[in-house]
């Protein structure tokens, strides 16, 4: 079955750019709207945005000016870049796939998550 | 922006029925889904399209959605069901999560 694995630095300095990769195994990145979702410590889930293999993206409004999500179909990976980070961006970051190729949401496949701390 | 509201906590005794609610403006006009998240683990989809259970999810989990409220019902709650539960819907062209409900079974 499809498995997702997030990777990237666990520590990022304030004002720098957070960069994460999600590697997809057991399936193709094509034909799905792939999302990044984060969860600050002790808090709830926050959707960051999605990307489709055509390059279409959609971002959460309050993060839109700082976020870039992209797909590398040759490597079967998606990536997240979040610029000008602050302590408020400290969270576990998940990549996730919807249950259907025509759905933007309703995620039945999640990565294990990767903790990113923003601190000097 | 669209918002979903969940009570912060619900407690039930083992074997009782737990009803977790999720409120949003005309939520019944869109699909809602539910995730279970145990401590230190990734969320797991337990209900989608209001009432559908993914394969592998026990039959004691059921869902409904009407008016302004979606409800996740756990019939005969077990200690293993103790977790955080999040509702989610599509609203204002974005994915929206509720704030989550901590279910305690004891």
Image (cartoon, grey):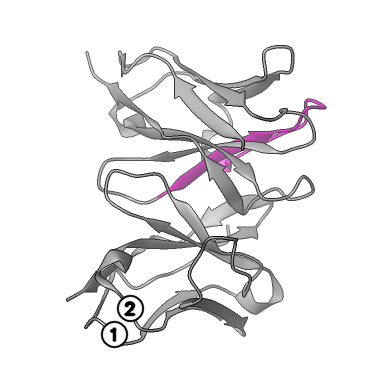
Towards the viewer: A86 or B71: B71
Q: Is residue A117 left or right of residue A66?
A: left
Residue A47, how many percent across, how many down?
52, 44
SS at badge 2: loop
Magenta stretch? A45-61
Q: Check residue A20 for magenta coloring.
A: no
Q: Is residue A49 magenta?
A: yes
Question: Which residue sits at x=69%, y=70%?
Answer: B30
A93 relative to A70, above or below: below
The image quadrant that residue B90 belongs to is bottom right
> What is the number of callouts on the image?
2
| Tag 2 near tag 1, CB within 8 Å | yes
Q: Give residue A74's position: percent from left, percent from top.
A: 74, 12
Tell me residue B84's x, y (percent). 33, 60
Are labels 2 and 1 on one chain? yes
- The local secondary structure at tag 1 comes to loop
For mark 1, name the chain.
B
Q: Residue B77, labelled with which disc?
A: 2
Q: Which residue is mark 1?
A: B15
Quarter occupied by the C terminus of chain A = top left
Q: Residues within 10 Å of mark 1 (few under 14, many from 20)?
A: some
Residue A16 visible, this angle: yes
Towards the viewer: A11 or A106:
A106
């Amino acid at each position: 079955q499809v498995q997702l694995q997030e990777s990237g630095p666990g520590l990022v300095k304030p004002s720098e750019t957070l960069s994460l990769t999600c590697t997809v195994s057991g399936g193709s990145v094509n034909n799905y709207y792939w999302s990044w979702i984060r969860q600050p410590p002790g808090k709830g889930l926050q959707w960051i945005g999605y990307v489709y293999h055509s390059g279409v993206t959609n971002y959460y409004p309050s993060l839109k000016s700082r976020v870039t999500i992209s797909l590398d179909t040759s490597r079967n990976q998606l990536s997240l870049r979040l610029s000008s980070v602050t302590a408020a961006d400290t969270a576990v970051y998940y990549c996730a796939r919807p249950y259907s190729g025509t759905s933007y949401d309703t995620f039945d496949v999640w990565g294990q998550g990767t903790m990113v701390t923003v601190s000097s | 922006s669209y918002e979903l509201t969940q009570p912060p906590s619900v407690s039930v005794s083992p074997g009782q029925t737990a009803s977790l609610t999720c409120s949003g403006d005309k939520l019944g006009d869109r699909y809602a889904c539910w995730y279970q998240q145990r401590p230190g683990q990734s969320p797991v989809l337990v209900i989608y399209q209001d009432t559908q259970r993914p394969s592998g999810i026990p039959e004691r989990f059921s869902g409904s959605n009407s008016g302004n409220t979606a409800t996740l019902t756990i019939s005969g709650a077990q200690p293993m069901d103790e977790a955080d539960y999040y509702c989610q819907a599509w609203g204002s062209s974005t994915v929206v999560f509720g704030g989550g409900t901590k279910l305690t079974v004891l």
